[in-house]
Amino acid sequence: MGYTATWRILEDIIIELRKKGVTIPPNVMTDLKSAKLMINISQAEGSTGEVTQKVEEYLANVEGYLITEAEKTFGSERVDEWLRRLEAAICEVCEVKGEEENKFILGVPRDQKWIRVEPIQSLPPERLKQLAQELNLTVNPQKDGRLVVYGQPEDIKEFLKKMTAEAIKK
């Protein structure tokens, strides 16, 4: 997970700073330890978004202090290298979050049901959209090529029946 990579990079920066004789304040070390604990908790099944938020908060506190100190001690070239590594770790976090957030669909009214459909060769996106429109359903394409189809529960059921029947025919 990207948080662990970020934590390790921050730990490496602390080690380098200590080698140069820089004293790290106790609150920064406490935040780093707390971040590690929260990362472990966030990897447990059933953890909440609050845990992830705390991880990000602790890591941001530590990063803010360490980057400032590293700039004073090592100069911008070495700090830029660390920042690139941190950015790569953050991008990894974003990819993981993107997968998690993909479970939730925004913009679907509360009284309506939705399904996510992945087009297949026998049911291309155009045909799926046509089937959905015939049943007064709304279709939203996603970045990954899948379609979110939503509407009244009975219409969704009918859509599934028609889609299944058509896929079996071909």
Image (cartoon, rainbow, N blue to C red):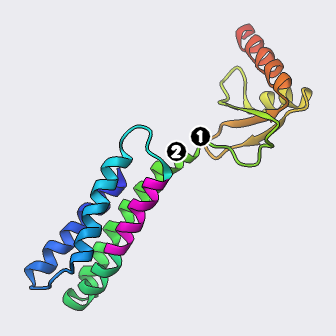
Q: Which mark is residue 103?
A: 1
Which residue type carries mark 2?
A: Glu
Label 2 with label 1: CB-CB less than 8 Å: yes
Q: From this viewpoint, which residue is outermost toward the top?
A: 169
* Residue at 24% from the left image edge and 89% from the top image edge: 75
Left or right of 113, for residue 55: left
Left or right of 57, for residue 80: left
Residue 44, image x and y in percent? Answer: 36, 41
Q: CA distance from mark 2 to mark 1?
A: 6 Å
Label 1: few (<14), some (14–19) or many (≥20) C-alpha neighbours in 10 Å: few
Residue 83, image x and y in percent? Answer: 33, 74
Residue stretch rendered in magenta on the structure: 50-62
Quick one: 140 or 151, which is closer to the camera?
151
Which residue type carries mark 1?
A: Lys
Residue 12, image x and y in percent? Answer: 19, 68
Label 2: few (<14), some (14–19) or many (≥20) C-alpha neighbours in 10 Å: few
Q: Secondary structure at mark 2?
A: helix
Residue 18 figure quarter: bottom left
Q: Is 59 included in the stretch rendered in magenta?
A: yes
* Residue at 24% from the left image edge and 83% from the top image edge: 70
- Which residue position is annotated with label 2? 100
Left or right of 142, for residue 157: right
Q: Which mark is residue 52?
A: none
Quick one: 5 or 118, which is closer to the camera?
5
* Residue at 34% from the left image edge and 67% from the top image edge: 86
Q: Is 56 included in the stretch rendered in magenta?
A: yes
Residue 7 figure quarter: bottom left
Quick one: 130 or 102, which is closer to the camera?
102
